[in-house]
Amino acid sequence: MCKLATAFPTLQQCLHFKSTLLAVKRFGTSGGRENCCINASYLAMDRKRNLIPDIFRQVKRRKFGLVGNFKLLDKEKAQIFEVLKHQLYSIVKDKTTVDRQLNEMKDLGDVRIFQFGFDTDVFGVVFSEDYKSKVLAATATRESALTVQRFLETVLTSCTDIGFNEDKMLKEFSFHDQEITQLVNAGLLTVRDVGSWWLAIPGAGRFVKYFVKGRKAVLGMIRKAKYNEVLQSDLETRKVTSAVKLGIQYHVHDIVGAELVKCIPTTTGTLLRLNDT
């Protein structure tokens, strides 16, 4: 089990998915233990209730939203914010719990989930409120602004799917072909196949570019080490190249959650070893 996972035994006991979001959103700063702790008495008091909405509101009140730490700037200085689903597995080792509670949050409309297309196992997670704000800011001056607004008010408020087919868009939501093209050009949809689209985030291509380059660079650092292994604490303090624009700790959670490395406890800390498979 990795360092962050061992620091949060209550996550496995209480199964508070929102606190894992809080942890991932803040792992870019030092001192992960104090950054990610949720008041123990608060958790004990509400143990018998569904804490997802409560923790969600707590996170939002403290302004620890995704947009706070996971951000890149595109040409218009708009923010791109992503927490990847598998990164949560690096904190809560029970994948079933993560998947179940993430789906509950999606069904409640608290978060949106995105498939990027370059890897079928990589999904982005964004708070719904942040997604709408990002989209409106990125498309405010476009000719498609009215189409985008209608998409947000009709499709997103009534459908939590990560993709849409032609029947749903044309018949159920009454969008015309030209309007769908506008949504694709605005970055709200990406083509999945003929007559089907993934829900998307404007400017996400830039994020994907940085993510792929950063992952490759971090794995390369481990590959160059003796026996293809390195202490996590040493890796996180290394000077990185310009390819790692998302931060070294972001990619540590990425490669751990994606099981690209094995986490081996040692007396000197967690050892990350490249996975042979």
Image (cartoon, grey):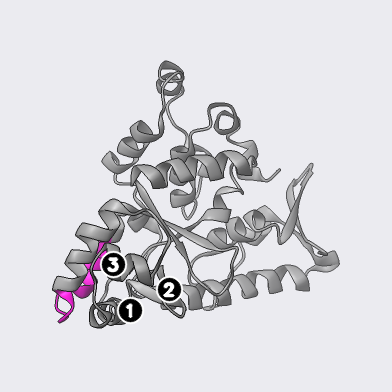
Earlier along the polypeptide chain: callout 1 or callout 2?
1
| Nearest-to-viewer mark from 2 and 3 | 3
Disc 1 crowd, CA 10 A, few/some/many (<14, 14-19, 20+): some
In the image, residue 94 lies in the stretch drawn in magenta:
no
Say which amino acid is labelled 1: Val
Mark 1, residue position:
184
Q: Number of marks in the image? A: 3
- Quarter occupied by the N terminus: top right
Please tell me which residue is depicted at 78% across the width and 69% down the height of the picture. 225
Say which amino acid is labelled 2: Ser
Disc 3 crowd, CA 10 A, few/some/many (<14, 14-19, 20+): few
Q: Which mark is residue 196?
A: 2
**Secondary structure that dominates the magenta span:** helix
Say which amino acid is labelled 3: Lys
Q: CA distance from mark 2 to mark 3?
A: 13 Å
Q: CA distance from mark 3 to mark 1?
A: 18 Å
Residue in front for this viewpoint, 130 or 142: 142
- Whether residue 20 is visible here, answered yes or no, is no
Where does residue 229 sit, x and y in percent of width and height?
79, 61
Q: Secondary structure at mark 3?
A: helix
Q: Secondary structure at mark 1?
A: helix
Where does residue 193 sit, x and y in percent of width and height?
48, 78
Please tell me which residue is depicted at 30% across the width and 60% down the height of the picture. 131
Mark 3, residue position:
171
